[in-house]
Image (spheres, rainbow, N blue to C red):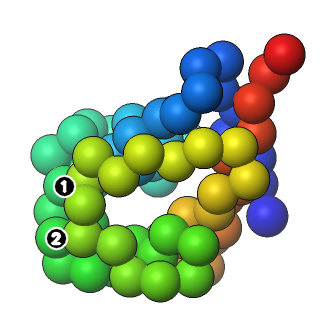
Amino acid sequence: MKEVWIRDDFIKLGQAMKLAGVVGSGLDAKMLILDEEVLVNGEVCTQRGKKLTEGDTFTYGNESFKVCRKG
């Protein structure tokens, strides 16, 4: 599982996907999320603006990412 490091208390799912390099744009993230191809904490998520906090995970395809907080 790869880690996505954030400085704030949360990050939105679409932003986390861009930060992790899963997608190149917010539109790409939106389409994958609406097509129910992204899991958050093991469950399908269709909310692009879903807030992820430290310890949350998201999965697309074979890759899983864990949100970690700096500081």
Which of the 4 image quadrants contains residue 56?
Answer: bottom right
**What residue did someone put label 1 on?**
30
Left or right for 40, reference 32: right
Left or right for 19, reference 55: left
How many numbered discs sit on the rendered protein? 2
Res 18 visible: no
| In the foreground, 35 or 67 | 67
Residue at image coords 80%, 21%: 70
Percent coordinates x, y for residue 60 in the rendering = 48, 71
Q: Quadrant of the C terminus?
A: top right
Q: Of all residues shown, which one is farthest toward the right?
A: 71
The disc at residue 34 is 2
Under circle 1, the secondary element is helix
Res 52 visible: yes
Percent coordinates x, y for residue 24 in the rendering = 33, 40
Percent coordinates x, y for residue 42 in the rendering = 57, 82
Percent coordinates x, y for residue 8 in the rendering = 59, 20
Q: Are marks 2 and 1 in contact (CB under 8 Å)?
A: yes
Residue at image coords 47%, 83%: 43
In this rendering, the answer to whether 67 lies above or below 70 is below
Residue at image coords 24%, 70%: 46
Alpha carbons under labels 2 and 1: distance apart: 6 Å
Report crowding for label 1: few under 14, some 14 to 19, many 20 or more residues within 10 A (C-alpha): some
Which of the 4 image quadrants contains residue 36?
Answer: bottom left
- Please name the amino acid that badge 1 sits on: Lys
In this rendering, the answer to whether 45 lies above or below 68 is below
Left or right for 3, reference 20: right
Residue at image coords 79%, 64%: 1
Under circle 2, the secondary element is helix
| In the foreground, 65 or 42 | 42
- Please name the amino acid that badge 2 sits on: Leu
Left or right for 56, reference 33: right
